[in-house]
Image (spheres, rainbow, N blue to C red):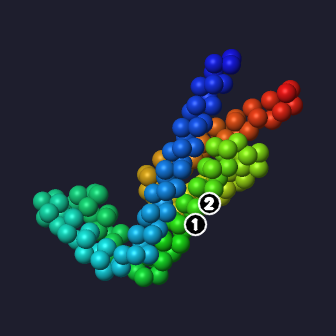
Amino acid sequence: MKNIEHDIHRVFQISIILKGLQAAMEILGGLFFYVVSTQAILQAVNRLTLTELTEDPRDFVAAHLLSAAQNLTGATEHFYAYYLISHGVIKVLLVIGLLREMRIAYPVSLAAMAGFIAYQLYRYSYTHSAMLILLTVFDLVVCALIWHEWRQKQRLTQTG
């Protein structure tokens, strides 16, 4: 039993580190939206997708990427920047708390993750993005691991 708990703890640590890397990427993405203009993004996406869409006008990835860039406005760019940076900073703080095994980090992380999951499902109702579903499934697994880890810490405190 102890060996299984050790393995679950390692999976927990790895998933939390992956969440930290995801948070860092979100912060960088948010900073990108603050620094790079909407017009520059559209020009870059046009260059990236031109060849692919010339060869196959129905290319799924290229068509969706171009559509997303064309629908980007200054207001949506600022929203994405704010959303990504704030989302990333919250996750980084939670990851630090969890890796330091701070008691308060477990329930706060679960509450924050529940909020993120709810928002992702809300966004999915509009976008039908498979990536949102994958991210949500990963977040649910991380929540289960956080819950398990929290319960283990509580048991050790009670018996210790």
Residue toward you, 160 or 155: 160
> Relative to residue 141, is residue 74 depicted above or below?
below
Place of residue 11 in the rendered image (x, y in percent of width and height, measured from the top left)? 56, 33
Are the residues at dot 1 and dot 2 in contact (C-beta closer than 8 Å)?
yes
How many marks the image carries: the answer is: 2
Kind of residue at badge 1: Ser
Quarter that holds the C terminus: top right
> Relative to residue 60, is residue 154 depicted above or below?
above
Kind of residue at badge 2: Ile
Q: Quarter-wise, where is residue 67 in the image?
A: bottom left
Q: Secondary structure at mark 1?
A: helix
Q: Which residue sits at x=77%, y=45%?
A: 103
Badge 1 is on which residue?
Answer: 86
Residue 107 visible at all:
no
Residue 2 placement, left or right of 28: right
Place of residue 137 in the rendered image (x, y in percent of width and height, measured from the top left)? 54, 45
Badge 2 is on which residue?
Answer: 90
Q: Quarter-wise, where is residue 159 in the image?
A: top right
Place of residue 126 in the rendered image (x, y in percent of width and height, measured from the top left)? 49, 64
Residue toward you, 113 or 94: 94
Q: Which residue sits at x=66%, y=24%?
A: 5
Place of residue 104 in the rendered image (x, y in percent of width and height, measured from the top left)? 76, 50
Residue 117 visible at all:
yes
Quarter that holds the N terminus: top right
Residue 76 placement, left or right of 122: left
Report the disc number at residue 108.
Answer: none
Residue toward you, 79 or 134: 79
